[in-house]
């Protein structure tokens, strides 16, 4: 009987210890902060000009950072981890079309993070632009746009633009991982280049 009492005592201690644990939150890391487009502040206007001298302006209308929870429901309880996000919207006043950027700090092995939500696992920065993945591990290009040399450039192909501002408009987009949009080529073969930064 004494042995059972001791076992019950230790089981209760373990149960209470487990209840005191907090779910993990994956925060943006300081070394990745420059990839979250810090220059895209609300009200900023990006001006693009093509070879004919025509201009397009995109204005930052939203820039929000928050913590979200990823929740799964088990048989007896729900479990989750939280992650930091940033959401940016660029709008063009003429067409009323919008371009969406979404970043999140997310565990690399989601299944492990789900099952052991009190333990922090390795995470990475994920990003999308109008649902097109921004692969920060991809080999980056160097591109000169209006005399500015950008060294962290991703080339995105138009076949993947299914929604947002560039849907049906762009064939190729050049995106600098530190500066954002720097150039795009439309379906009429015009090259729109960033003229202000």
Image (tube, rainbow, N blue to C red):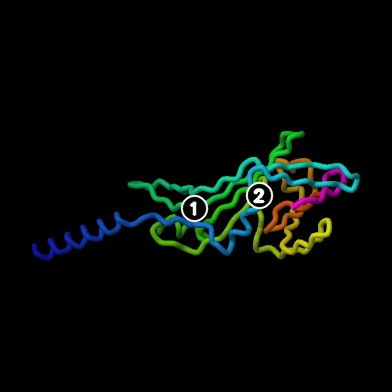
The mark closer to the camera, 1 or 2, is 2
**Residue occupying the far right of the picture:** 52
Nearer to the camera, 39 or 159: 39
Residue 153 vs residue 17: left or right? right
Disc on the earlier residue, 1 or 2: 2
Residue 57 vs residue 21: left or right? right
Kindly identify which residue carries mark 2. 40
Quadrant including the N terminus? bottom left
Q: Is residue 189 magenta?
A: yes
**Image position, residue 94 (x, y; %):** 76, 34
* Residue at 56 percent of width and 53 percent of height: 104
Q: Tell me if mark 1 has few (under 14), some (14-19) or many (20+) residues whose alpha carbon lies within 10 angstroms of its own.
A: some
* Residue at 50 percent of width and 57 percent of height: 27
Q: Which residues are magenta?
A: 186-197
* Residue at 83 percent of width and 46 percent of height: 49
Q: Are marks 1 and 2 in contact (CB under 8 Å)?
A: no
**Image position, residue 17 (x, y; %):** 27, 59
Q: Quadrant of residue 153?
A: bottom right
Kindly identify which residue carries mark 1. 83
């Amino acid at each position: 009987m004494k042995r059972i009492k001791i076992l019950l005592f230790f089981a209760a201690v373990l149960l209470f210890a487990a209840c005191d644990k907090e779910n993990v939150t994956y925060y943006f890391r300081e070394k990745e902060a420059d990839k979250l487009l810090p220059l895209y502040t609300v009200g900023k206007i990006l001006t693009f000009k093509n070879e004919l001298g025509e201009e397009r302006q995109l204005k930052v209308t939203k820039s929000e950072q928050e913590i979200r929870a990823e929740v799964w429901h088990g048989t007896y309880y729900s479990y989750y981890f939280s992650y930091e996000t940033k959401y940016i919207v660029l709008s063009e006043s003429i067409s009323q079309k919008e371009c969406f950027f979404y970043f999140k700090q997310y565990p690399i092995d989601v299944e492990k993070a789900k099952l052991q939500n009190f333990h922090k696992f390795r995470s990475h920065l994920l990003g999308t632009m109008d649902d097109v993945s921004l692969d920060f591990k991809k080999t980056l290009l160097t591109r000169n746009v209006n005399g500015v040399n950008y060294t962290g450039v991703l080339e995105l192909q138009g076949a993947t633009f299914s929604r947002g501002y560039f849907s049906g408009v762009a064939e190729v987009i050049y995106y600098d991982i530190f500066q954002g949009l720097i150039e795009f080529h439309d379906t009429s073969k015009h090259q729109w280049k960033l003229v202000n930064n």
